[in-house]
Amino acid sequence: MRKLALTAIAAAFAVTAFTGGAQAAGDTPKPAAQEWSWGGIFGTYDRAQLQRGFQVYKNVCAGCHSLRFIAFRNLEGIGFNEDQIKAIAAEYDIEDGPNDDGDMFTRPGKPSDYFPSPFPNEKAAATSNGGAIPPDLSLINKARVAGPDYVFGLLTGYQEEAPEGFDLSDGKYYNDYFPGHQISMAPPLYDEAVEYGDGTPMTLEQHSRDVVAFLNWTAQPELEARKALGIKVILFLIVLTAMLYAVKRKIWRDIEH
């Protein structure tokens, strides 16, 4: 599993070099730091936001980007119940087999299945995307420096036209935060790209913020448990330090007398 994760991270970095322009990343501005609900030692995920982010991924991103390290049953972690997970999984066709005749076949997904790739292989992915292979998004927030801020900046950093004097290659789109500013992916999000049912504003910024939150969860589903453990360890160390200090004072008091 660890080897697969490292492979995915390496592949994601490779796609950056492959889809970017010839310019170095040195002239690329640093994306603005955003406030995220999971930031800080007491930060947690907002389950409603995670579910909206999953909706954005499912309706927009899943057409090109895989999520191969996440199983449908993992969606319990963002607040879906068993019946909802079964319904979500059943919407996907999963290749299985071979059957008794030695043939592969497709069946509705089950909670134990992992999200399937939108393409049968990398060659098909590249052919469908102008030669660029869309990276898997499972670990994307870990595979980029300042991951959540970078991905948010990328999604909101498209410009309708390149600046004057900038040589934009055919089939590329200008993006403020992509290394080289030339990206093969067309702007994936826009206002009202996904319809929310909870009254949340359906803006480009909100869609981007929600899907980034979801992708941070896919990259770090254990974040809350890790923070909770860290707080317990800190409290334990504080109590232990106080106890040791009290013992030290008692011992030295007895020696001095």
Image (cartoon, helix red, strand yellow):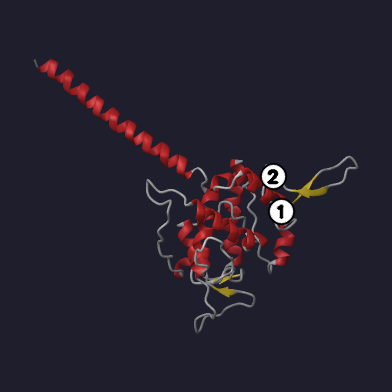
Q: Which residue is mark 1?
A: 91
Q: Which residue is mark 2?
A: 113
Question: Considering only vertical position in the picture, is 64 above or below 46?
Answer: below
Helix, strand or loop at label 2? It is loop
Work out which quarter of the rendered image holds the C terminus and state it: top left
Count of residue discs: 2
Question: Considering only vertical position in the picture, is 131 above or below 238?
Answer: below
The crowd level at tag 1 (other Cα within 10 Å; few <14, some 14-19, many 20+) is few
Q: Which is nearer the eye, 254 or 39?
A: 39
The type of residue carrying mark 1 is: Glu
**In which quarter of the view is residue 171 placed?**
bottom right
Q: Where does the image place residue 100, in percent across and percent down from the top left?
A: 89, 40
- Residue 141 in sight from this viewpoint: no
Q: CA distance from mark 1 to mark 2?
A: 12 Å
Q: Residue at x 18, y 18 (%)?
A: 251
**In which quarter of the view is residue 234 placed?**
top left
